[in-house]
Image (spheres, coloured by chain):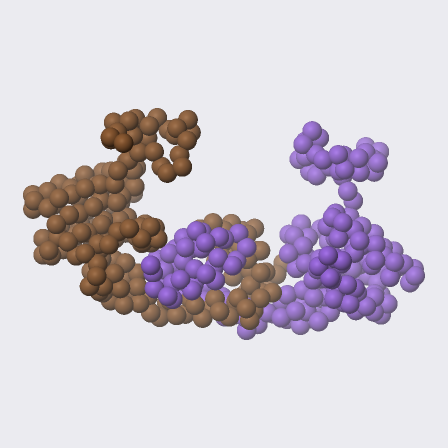
Chain colours: A purple, B brown
Amino acid sequence: MSAGEIDRLIGLLARLPGLGPRSARRAALHLLKRRESLMDPLMEALGAVAASVRLCPVCGNLDTRAPCSICADPRRDGTLICVVRDVADLWALERGGVFSGRYHVLGGLLSAIDGVGPEDLGLDRLQARVAEGPVAEVILALPATVEGQTTAHVIADLIEPTGITVSGLAQGVPVGGELDYLDDGTLTAALRARRPV
Amino acid sequence: MSAGEIDRLIGLLARLPGLGPRSARRAALHLLKRRESLMDPLMEALGAVAASVRLCPVCGNLDTRAPCSICADPRRDGTLICVVRDVADLWALERGGVFSGRYHVLGGLLSAIDGVGPEDLGLDRLQARVAEGPVAEVILALPATVEGQTTAHVIADLIEPTGITVSGLAQGVPVGGELDYLDDGTLTAALRARRPV
């Protein structure tokens, strides 16, 4: 059908999340038509990322510096540590621009089904980091799923003996949320956590 | 938020069709987590494609050979030329595996709005190719849109003086199509072009 090289590129593009075989073909053709403006820069960007981006040895963030620019920034509050599942969640919080502390990226969640235990997430590394540093509060910004909440409970149990505050994200109505489109669980949680206006 | 190199990669991935800013972030993270299994092979595949894939000087197909493997294949019927808009349409017809002739890729459609004229599509090149070769029939496999049908009419007018048969794809009910979900235009066309069972 098409040259082997193009087929191979389509096969690899189809393995990206959000692209299937059909959109991978479109993407490959799009790249082939825009060599100078897109394909060459993309190759360069992939090369630059592969050569320079590493995991931060302190928090698990991805950056060209080690420790990462958040861990190395003296303006960030070292007494606040926000625990997230993933670098994507760290990026989401940074886009919000409200959190001024530091992070700890787990790289996953505890899951009996997938066989992910505390040692796979390096929870002892988190415990040691919290014990060493001038940490006053650990914020567990983990998904409101069974795995997320299980992981949050396990981390809370590990850290609570040290006397450091452990908190979680508030649950309630999302901004712009219509009540009759919300699930019962969210509505119940929002009602229980009601507060004076 | 994240390192400049990662942001640059995300920006380029977001320019692929089917990916927005959000899915480009997911794709970049997916690549960063799978360096050996996906990022390195993708860089290699892009390099191989960039180094070897060229436009076929005869038909406009993309291939590592020039002329392309379809133009060079002696088993393909040189008396049949199928005119398509795009390499994607050529790939779609090749996946069907029914057409055994050769192709001519226009690279676009005539469009007064976008300022695409006959010279941009190289219609004189198509006319010369048809006049030179042992062509018996030109099949216009162009989209059933205003631009597609305008282009088809212009090409038919160019080729008809030579006496060569010019045909177009049949219009009608698509395979698996439910009548009450079809638009009126398709249903009318299918009724007009009815045939004995």
Q: Position of residue A16 (x, y in %)?
A: 52, 58
* Residue pictured at 26% horizontal, 49% vertical: B84
As drawn, A106 above or below B185? below
* Residue pictured at 63% horizontal, 58% vertical: B1
Does residue B121 show up? no
Q: Quadrant of residue B32?
A: bottom right
Q: Is residue A118 left or right of residue B141?
A: right
Q: Position of residue B160 (x, y in %)?
A: 10, 42
As drawn, A51 above or below B155? below
Tell me the quarter of the image containing the C terminus of chain B: top left
Question: Closer to the camera, B170 or A89?
Answer: B170
Does residue A68 show up? yes
* Residue pictured at 40% horizontal, 37% vertical: B176
Question: Closer to the camera, B80 or A132?
Answer: B80
Q: Quadrant of residue A103?
A: bottom right
Question: Closer to the camera, A194 or A70?
Answer: A194
Q: Position of residue A133 (x, y in %)?
A: 83, 68
Seen from this angle, which residue lies furthest front?
B197
* Residue pictured at 54% horizontal, 68% vertical: B37
